[in-house]
Amino acid sequence: MKKISILILTLIISFGTMAQTKKDGIKFYRYQKYRSAIKALEPLAGEDKIANYYLGLSYLDLEETAKAKSIFQRFPAHAPNMAGIARVLFIEKKDAEAKAMLESVIRKTSRKNKAAYLYAADAITYTNGGDLSKAVTWYDYYLEWKKSARVLIHKGDALRRMQKGGDAMDAYQAASEIGGYNSLSSYKQGNLWYASKTYDSALANYQRAADIDPENPLPYFDLSMAYYNINKYDRAKKEIEKYLKYSDNEPEDQMQYANILYLAKDYDGAINKMNELLQSGNGKSYMYRVLGYSHLEKGNVSEALKNMDLLFEKHPKDKLIARDYFTYGKILKKDSVRSGEALSFFNQGIEADTAKDKIPLYRELAENYKDDDDWAGAAQWYKKIVEAEDTPEKEILDYWWAGRSFYQVSDYGNAADMYSKMVAASPDDPIGHYWLAKVAAAQDPKYKTGSASELFKKYLPMVNDNADKAEKIAEANIYLAMVSYNKKQYAAARKYSTAALKANPGDADAKNILNALNKIK
């Protein structure tokens, strides 16, 4: 009897350990600790179908698609593993087969068990090619059967992909009310706040996620990004170090650490970490991105160009991002031999960017040209901003810089056009009227035509002897005085010269005109 009791106790402990290992493995998967998940789940996957499913998902998220497929195929009639196969089919661009497979999964539901809806919906939510609205419907079918925080989180993920942020937030908050997955639900809420650039709320939710489960690595990474966005670089580095502590600390995790070092302007740190990974044999093609970006910030143009060449040579073209093209273009622009290639890369970057509103991109490029004193290049990009459809991103200052850029290269026609548009956009702002007059005056250097006279006369009442505008007021009056003098309208010339001297008592031009007038009988 004693031997039997010991055997039973051993079995209970064994089953309990297996259950705990499986639970940990699934938790590791949800926290994106895929290597840890594989280590926990692999010994169980031959017998446990759910452990097998999460093992396959772990390999799938590590982009080991063939391995994941072979794992799912161990249980080809099991609904979750069938849904895993559907995910693979979506990745292989076999959308019709994937959808047919999911319909087979759905047929596994019964009145007593609706779990198949969850796995089928997940296959759509976390891959590309399916109908996200159908995934939401399937989640709702499951939720009608059983309330679940986990399913609400997944539904929120689908809604977020559909750009229904408010509905996604409702789902995540509902998950928090049910409980059980509060670290994840708080983390997801933080992501929504972060996406809307409401960093204080994002920080609060990420911190709550970390407090609920300090071993969840996900909020630490995003805490570091949020602190970076409010310019707290030391805190950003501190949080990413916590991420490394609780993540699998894989090369990919260390790459994220290097990313934060770059964002925190620790360019030497980012370069050293990336080179360390490359030299250790854990290099990935995307690492050349941070190396190229960092060397550009340090002014090492040749090293920046070498690494961006490697990025574009080795990295899959469909994984290049808009920022890669812009950075490559900025580097090429500084290279005396290849500078002519820059514009092509800037245009490719604009095409690669998924944002509908391109104004921030145009402004970035315009400022890049302006910072290099290339006013002709800056003018072309500022002009694109002015001519783009009005959005909240467009600023009245963009009109001014557009006009100023053309003015700098003596392209007065385009300069006048830009300032005319500025006046139309903000008619009560005197600065647009001033520069419109200044452009006209530049085309009348000998004060013969008086082409800027009416424009300056419109500008002057708008500033009303404003002391802050003294030099501009004097300049306008000097122009009017000179035009009047050349037309022998001496009384008017004296009036305008006196006004110029009143605005700017040391104005030499005003004194010279008055002296000339005093000599006329």
Image: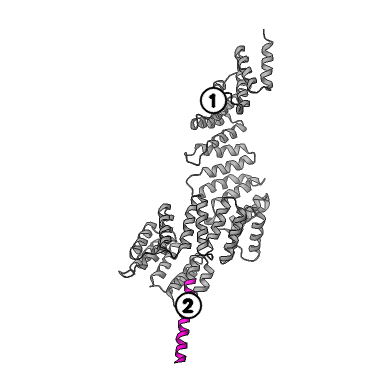
Say which amino acid is labelled 2: Met
| Residue at point 48%, 75% (across, down) | 20
Please tell me in which quadrant of the rendered image residue 383 appears. top right
Q: Which residue is mark 1?
A: 462
Quarter of the image that includes the N terminus = bottom left
Image location (x, y in percent) of residue 282 = 61, 65
**Category of crowding for the residue at label 1, using alpha-carbon neighbours closer than 10 angstroms: few (below 14), some (14–19), many (at least 20):** some
Boundaries of the magenta span: 1-24
The secondary element bearing badge 1 is classed as: helix
Quadrant assignment, res 111: bottom left
Image spot of residue 342 (x, y percent):
60, 46
Relative to 339, is 100 above or below?
A: below
Q: Secondary structure at mark 2?
A: helix
Q: x, y percentage for residue 392?
A: 48, 41
Numbered mark located on residue 18 in the image: 2
Q: Is residue 473 left or right of residue 421?
A: right
Q: Residue at x 60, y 56 (%)?
A: 235
Q: On screen, 338 above or below 249?
A: above
- Identify the residue shown where x is 64% and y is 41%: 372
> In front here: 482 or 240?
240
Above or below: residue 490 compared with residue 333: above
* Most distant residue in the top direction: 521
